[in-house]
Amino acid sequence: MTGLLLDNIGSLVTNDPGIGQGPLGLVRDAAVIFEGGVVAWAGPRSKVPGGGTDTRVDAEGRAVIPGFVDSHAHLVFAGDRTAEFAARMSGQRYSAGGIRITVNATRAASADVLRSNAGRLVAEALRSGTTTMECKSGYGLTVDDEARCLEVAGEFTEEVTFLGAHVVPPEYASHPDDYVELVRTAMLDACAPKAKWVDVFCERGAFDGDQARAILAAGIERGLQPRIHANQLGPGPGVQIAVEVGAASADHATHLDDADVEALAASSTIATLLPAAEFSTRAAYPDARRLLDAGVTVALAADCNPGSSFTSSMPFCIAIAVRDMHMTPDEAVWAATMGGARALRRTDIGHLGIGARADAVLLDAPSHIHLSYRPGVQLVAGVWQAGTLVRTARRAWQPGG
């Protein structure tokens, strides 16, 4: 047999209950075989099929999990908002208005600058185990600037989202409906061919429910799939609109009433929670426990952006979700892998079942639980993306330590 055998795994998370135990499909004393960029086999070491492989990697009793799927990121931008963060830590309240600072810097930046910054962040995320990232536009807010931001995003991921409806730019402040019309027409005409998704920041200070519906409908007409920023800064119509239009995900989902939770539970829309945003803005965290107990499918994402969540670390988000959002370690790891895949409506990532893309992370730990048990510690020892080692494995954890 050709391919790679990742052997002597102490604890393997497959997210496939048909392979292992529980929702995580957990297998102890495990192995996995990658062939042709996909998972050819996974299970107990004692049952590894014969025939051999070209390459064997000894995990030395450490844990292996699927690569993280970060389904919400804003990576194409220029500029810095350090002063805004410092002011917030001194007591200033977060609002959507700070986005305009990044818009000005992004418009002034060259494509090379935008490309270099996005590439740095993608590489940073990969080092912490993220093998799939979604990437939005939203810091250009002109037809040409949104189009070039999408072009840059498309160099790094196929999960490209048009977010021309991020905020109303200053030049349209006195006539926002004209900007909505621009987004619905000329901007989408130019941008839809470069994107897979359409998104709207449905929030006070951004776009109201009617505006969000109109923009999402225009995107859907052009073949884009909907997702939405919903209920981050306060109660609002975002979650209900997400369910109404069949959005893949309602992102943030922080301020929900019972009707919102019931609507999500009865739908295929994923609630994507972004705990690093609450961490960075000192806001109340979403009630993940309430959502999970109601039967809502939950994803975790990092929301990497220069204003409200400047981190690309999914392990950090897992630790916050367990500590402050009352998720179990198992639920948080599932949400950061399989949950993210569901939020992108992907079946080939987020798990290590047979036929999945061979995206895997080797941890310097005996269990995935260490991701929340040891917050802030770099535990990622190796990363495979489509079966190729893209982060070199290293040795640190000692069995029995």
Image (cartoon, rainbow, N blue to C red):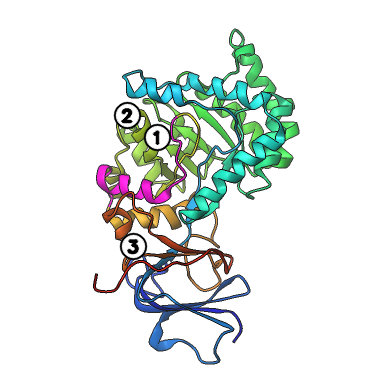
According to the picture, the residue beneath numbered tag 1 turns out to be: 277
Quadrant in the picture for residue 112: top right
Look at the numbered disc 3 and give the secondary structure of its residue: loop
Q: Do the residues bearing badges 3 and 2 touch, measured as CB atoms within 8 Å? A: no
Of residue 257 and residue 190, the one placed in the foreground of this image is 190
Q: Amino acid at mark 3?
A: His
Is there any visible trace of residue 15 in the rendered image?
no
| Mark drawn on residue 283 | 2
Instruction: Name the image quarter holding the N terminus.
Output: bottom right
| Mark drawn on residue 381 | none
Look at the numbered disc 1 and give the secondary structure of its residue: helix
Q: Earlier in the sequence, mark 3 or mark 2?
A: 2
Residue 16 higher or lower than 192, as above or below = below
Would you call the spot at circle 2 few (<14 residues within 10 Å), some (14-19), or many (20 or more)?
some
Quadrant in the picture for residue 378: bottom left
| Residue at the limit of the structure toward the top, as seen here | 174
| Residue drawn at point x = 36 percent, y = 74 percent | 20
How far apart in space, not on screen, are marks 3 and 2 (Cα)? 28 Å
Q: Amino acid at mark 1?
A: Ala
Would you call the spot at circle 1 few (<14 residues within 10 Å), some (14-19), or many (20 or more)?
many
According to the picture, the residue beneath numbered tag 3 turns out to be: 368
Q: Do the residues bearing badges 2 and 1 touch, measured as CB atoms within 8 Å? A: yes
The stretch in magenta equals: 308-327
How far apart in space, not on screen, are marks 2 and 1 (Cα)? 8 Å
Q: Earlier in the sequence, mark 2 or mark 1?
A: 1
Instruction: Name the image quarter holding the C terminus.
Output: bottom left
